[in-house]
Image (spheres, rainbow, N blue to C red):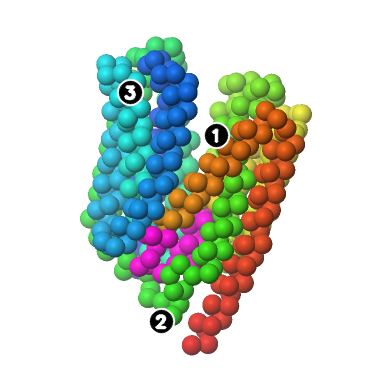
């Protein structure tokens, strides 16, 4: 392995550690935000509205921040500012008992605003190094470390509340949020170390031949539409958990364990399909999408816990493949000077389609589970022709480049 590739791996590991501790911070917080807001006096409708608003801002603003990052080329500065806002807002929630639920809601939205600022720029920085080691493998490494944090954060908060014996008063929650200052600080420190060691990450990426993948071309747009259908058909785990609890397939306390299991499968799937992407390109997402589209009938139409678990595992496979391959494909299709814009637009579209699909499936849940399942499966199946077209265009482009 040459020195440049070793440096690229080291850089990706540093960014992965940042993701691990940042996910530990805000995924830990998100696991207890609902009951915390209710204890502060917010209504259920307020909790739903603030959560939805935060997610909308977290995705919609990426279109703007991605464009700004490309125009200014200040990827590091934008990433650091975004992470600072994103992470500092979480431990500040410890002060909410004295300041009220409106203050807490403001911080929840602010945290998502921070993520919207840093996401396109940070993903662009990671893409520079990922191209050196293999885009699929590079983003899979990021996802594995990310999911370790996503698993550890809620577990940490669960232990804090259990040891304090304060699941129904604010003291334990405040302590939990205050303790999240530790991983937040670690994430920021490691981010600054990465910035110090690798101030010019764009140097990892080799220049492409003139005429290669000119910006947001046809392959990008076919891929964008395919991902939109895929996101539309993927139910959120909250709806799955609601169903499994309501139908008494599982006890309430087992549902978080199912989510943790799905996150474990997510990490393994990201590694497997990330490496497959480097070898077989778009074929990897075609296979993973074809497998994952069957999660809905197992979860929503099954009447046994075993079959529901199969559905959760299929859902986890889909999530892991998406996290590693989706970013990898954008990196392959789009040149580095347009990548911030591409990631911003991509994430905005993904979030919008995910929200619309989740909203529709939530409506259908009370009307017809069969209709819900059909919408999920048909939407995901409709993504496959667009992925096939993207694969064909990329192969044609590769053949054209090879003949130059």
For the question of whether residue 244 can be seen, the reply is yes
Q: Which residue: 44% across, 18% down?
A: 43
Q: Which residue: 37% across, 76% down?
A: 207
Q: Which residue: 66% across, 62% down?
A: 385
Q: Earlier in the sequence, mark 3 or mark 1?
A: 3
Q: Position of residue 305 (x, y in %)?
A: 72, 29
Is 350 left or right of 110, judged from the image as shown?
Answer: right
User: Is residue 240 one of those drawn in magenta?
Assistant: no
Q: Which residue is mark 1?
A: 260
Q: Which residue: 55% across, 61% down?
A: 223
Residue 102: image tag:
3
Name the chief secondary structure element in magenta: helix
Q: Which residue is mark 2?
A: 210
Q: Position of residue 117 (x, y in %)?
A: 33, 48
Give above or below for 300 relative to 212. Answer: above
For the residues marked 2 and 1, what is the alpha-carbon distance in whole angstroms?
46 Å
Residue at far bottom of view? 404
Tell which tag, 3 or 1, sits nearer the viewer: 3
Residues at badges 3 and 1 in contact (C-beta under 8 Å)? no
Q: Position of residue 266 (x, y in %)?
A: 56, 45
Give above or below for 151 relative to 228. Answer: above
Give above or below for 3 relative to 377. Answer: below
For the residues marked 3 and 1, what is the alpha-carbon distance in whole angstroms?
31 Å
Q: Quadrant of residue 26?
A: top left
For the residues marked 3 and 2, what is the alpha-carbon distance in whole angstroms?
53 Å
Q: Quadrant of residue 275?
A: bottom right
Is 195 left or right of 151, judged from the image as shown?
Answer: left
Residue at far left of view? 196
Q: Position of residue 350 (x, y in %)?
A: 51, 50
Q: Secondary structure at mark 2?
A: loop
Give above or below for 40 relative to 10. Answer: above
Q: Which residues are magenta?
A: 324-342
């Amino acid at each position: 392995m040459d020195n440049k590739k070793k440096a690229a791996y080291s850089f990706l590991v540093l960014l992965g550690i940042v993701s691990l501790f940042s996910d530990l911070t805000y995924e830990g917080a998100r696991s207890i935000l609902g009951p915390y807001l209710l204890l502060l006096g917010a209504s259920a409708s307020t909790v739903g509205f603030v959560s939805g608003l935060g997610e909308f801002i977290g995705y919609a603003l990426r279109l703007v921040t991605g464009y700004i990052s490309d125009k200014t080329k200040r990827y590091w500065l934008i990433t650091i500012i975004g992470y600072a806002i994103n992470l500092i807002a979480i431990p500040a929630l410890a002060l909410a008992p004295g300041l009220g639920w409106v203050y807490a809601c403001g911080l929840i939205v602010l945290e998502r605003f921070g993520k919207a600022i840093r996401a396109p720029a940070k993903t662009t920085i990671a893409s520079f190094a990922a191209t050196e080691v293999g885009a699929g493998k590079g983003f899979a490494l990021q996802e594995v470390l990310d999911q370790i944090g996503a698993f550890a954060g809620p577990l940490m908060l669960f232990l804090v509340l259990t040891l304090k014996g304060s699941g129904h008063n604010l003291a334990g929650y405040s302590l939990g949020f205050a303790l999240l200052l530790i991983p937040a600080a670690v994430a920021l420190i490691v981010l600054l170390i990465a910035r110090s060691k690798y101030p010019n990450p764009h140097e990892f990426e080799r220049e492409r031949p003139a005429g290669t993948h000119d910006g947001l071309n046809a392959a990008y747009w076919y891929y964008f539409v395919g991902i939109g259908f895929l996101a539309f058909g993927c139910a959120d785990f909250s709806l799955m958990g609601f169903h499994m609890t309501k139908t008494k397939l599982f006890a309430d306390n087992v549902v978080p364990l199912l989510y943790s299991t799905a996150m474990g499968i997510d990490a393994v799937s990201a590694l497997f399909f990330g490496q497959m992407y480097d070898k077989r390109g778009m074929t990897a997402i075609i296979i993973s999408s074809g497998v994952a589209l069957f999660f809905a009938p197992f979860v929503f139409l099954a009447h046994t816990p075993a079959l529901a678990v199969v559905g959760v595992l299929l859902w986890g496979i889909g999530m892991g493949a998406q996290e590693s391959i989706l970013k990898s494909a954008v990196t392959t299709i789009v040149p580095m000077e347009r990548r911030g814009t591409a990631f911003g637009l991509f994430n905005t579209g993904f979030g919008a389609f995910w929200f619309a699909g989740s909203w529709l499936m939530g409506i259908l849940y009370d009307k017809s589970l069969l209709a819900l399942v059909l919408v999920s499966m048909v939407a995901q199946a409709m993504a496959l022709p667009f992925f096939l077209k993207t694969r064909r265009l990329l192969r044609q482009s590769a053949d054209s480049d090879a003949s130059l």
